[in-house]
Structures are given as structure tokens and as C-alpha cells.
Amino acid sequence: MSRQTAKTLNQAKAQAFADRMLDTLNKASAALMISVGHRTELFDTLADLPPTTSERIADAAGLNERYVREWLGAMVTAGIVDYDPAGGTYFLPREHAAFLTRAASPNNLASTAQFIPVLASVENEIVESFRKGGGVPYSSYPRFHEVMAEESSQTTVSGLTDAILPLVPGLIENLREGIEVMDVGCGRGRALILMAGTFPKSRFTGYDFSEEAIADAGAEAARQGLDNVRFEAQDVVRIDEPARYDLITAFDAIHDQAAPRKVLKAIARALRPGGVFLMQDIYASSHVHKNIDNPLGTFTYTVSCLHCMTVSLALGGEGLGAAWGEEKALELLAEAGFSQVGVKRLPHDIINNYYIAGRN
């Protein structure tokens, strides 16, 4: 830094920002190690142990002690695991386990931390897209559908029958009596499989672009012996089933589409008179200044830039991104022909809005 530049700086402000950047580096590193802790089930192991040495933790988890010890160092310095230097023991407080273990689902934030390394794996391709435009295709993301299915199980599947479906008056009763349901961008089909098992008189169809995800969904439905649900690999923009469905759902799927306007219009056409479109999508504003106080604002824009926006652009799409926002969502729903749209939130879900849309 030149002397002249130093003189023009507000030193206190500069130091505060430097401290914030150091904190960011530490927290970003913690996120990576939290993902490791989830995948190795170390948090689950620690939650069942009293204050214990790294050797005993490694034995209980069936892992290499040297790696476990280094991981524990990151957890201790991040303030996640307690350490007693006198006894050389480590302990995961119950208050921390409540947000880090599989038993804590749907509050397991360690599961969500997996998105950080998944997204980081495409950094080189994203940087190239910054320079040349275009996007990064779904095929470039290792474990994406696996991680997304796990996240969906927490945010969507866990609250589906008790909280999400009841947002639509009378829907539970209709599902019990038997209706036609389609899920757009179904992924591995966890939501549809739960509904198919819960409401055997209704019939369910799931469409997704990914053949890998559809194969997994079909295998799981077969494993559970469900004959009222089918899955098909299809570009949802090509859905052409006029007035076939009583309920159409889209869980965190519309903003990823290459042609979201065409998809929404296809959904509107596929609804029967009096049918309902239930769309779960990211809670955000379409205006960046209104997202400054969003508790997941930075995370949302990061996931968008490194996945949601770029996979759409890779297909020559609109690239709405995860932060397309409530204002833009309402605009596109109206453009598609939905004249009745309500927006609701759920206490257990800080990530999403729920749009309930119908047509005249």
C-alpha cells in the first residue's frame, strides 16, 4: 500500500474490514470441514459420546485417527467442539448437536454445508464462464442430486403432509379421495414417493431432465412397491397434457429452468379447471438491496451463481437464478395465466416461499 493511499484510508474501517475477511476465511474453512463431518458421520458419533479422546472417537466412527484429530482441531478452533487440554478430550455440546446431526433433521445444517464443496468443484468452469459467457451443465456437478435429495428431505419431505400440503385448503381431503398429481423437476422423487405412499387413491407423475435422478426415483418407488406413481425423464418445457392434473407441484425447480416462462405456461395448460399449482421457491426479493438483511442472502447468490443461474445459461436459457425473487415470480406466474396467486411462509422453513396459484 502506497503512503498516499494509506493517508486516504479510514484506518479503523480498513482494520474492521480486514478482521471481517479473516473471519470469512475461517468460516468458509469451517463450512468445508462441517461437510466432511456430516459425510463421515463424525457429528453423529460425537453426539453419542461423553468427553472422549481422538483415538476413541476414531474407533467409534471406524475412521483413521490422524484425520479425525486434524478435523477435531478445525472444529475446536471454530467453536463447534469443546476441548479439555487436561484430559485431551473432545465433546460436542447438545446445543450444537441439535443443528449438526442426522437425528436433528430438519434442522441439520451440516447436511446443507455439503453444497459448499459441491459448488466449489466447478470453480474453474465458472471462472471460464465469467470470461466467455455460457454456463456449466448439470453433468459437471458431482453428487449434486444426492445432496439435493438429502436437502429436499429436510426442507420439503419432512414437512410435506403436516405443513406444506395443508397450505391449500381442502387438498389433503382431495388427495385421500383420489386426484391426478404432477411434480415438475421432481429430482429423485422423494416428495412424490411420500405422497404416493400416503395417498394410495391418488395418481402421481414425476418429470425431470436428469435421467440419473429419474432412475433413482423409479428404483425407490419399486422398492417400496408403489404402483400409483411413475417417473419419466423429460424436458418439462415439452409437457403437453392439457387439463390433465388437479394438482401440480414444483419444489425449488422453476428458477433453474432454461425457459421458465414456457414451463409455467405448460403447467397452466396442464391444470384442470379448479386445479392448483403449488410452487416452492427461494425466499428472496428481486432487488438486491432488499436482500441485504436476508439471513441467507450471500448463500443464495452464491448457490445461484455457481449452480442455478449457470445450468440455465448452459442450455441457452434465461438464467433467472435462485434470487429471481418474489416480485419476478409473481410477474411470471401472472404472465403464464395464473390470476389467483397467494404467497405463504412456514415457520420451519427459512429458505422458501410457497406460491399457491390457480386460474379462472
Image (spheres, rainbow, N blue to C red):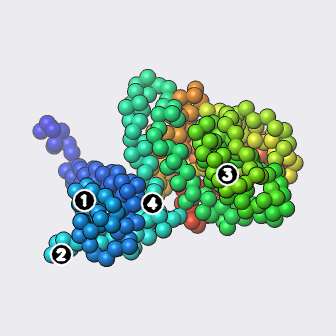
Q: Which residue is mark 1?
A: 65
Mark drawn on residue 221? 3
Q: N-terminal of the two: label 1 or label 4?
A: 1
Q: Which secondary structure lies at badge 4?
A: helix
Q: What's the CA distance linking mark 3 and mark 2? A: 50 Å
Q: Which secondary structure lies at badge 2?
A: loop
Q: Which residue is mark 2?
A: 87
Q: Amino acid at mark 3?
A: Ala
Image position, residue 251 (x, y; %): 63, 50
For image coordinates 44% across by 70% down, the residue present is 98
Q: N-terminal of the two: label 3 or label 1?
A: 1
> In the figure, 130 relative to 297: above or below?
above
Q: What's the CA distance linking mark 2 and mark 4? A: 29 Å
Mark drawn on residue 109? 4
Label 2 neighbourhood size at 10 Å, few (<14), some (14-19), many (20+)? few
Q: What's the CA distance linking mark 4 and mark 3? A: 27 Å
Kindly indicate the quadrant of the structure image that contains residue 270. top right
Q: Residue furthest top?
A: 132
Mark 2 vs mark 4, foreground winner is 2
Mark 2 vs mark 1, foreground winner is 1
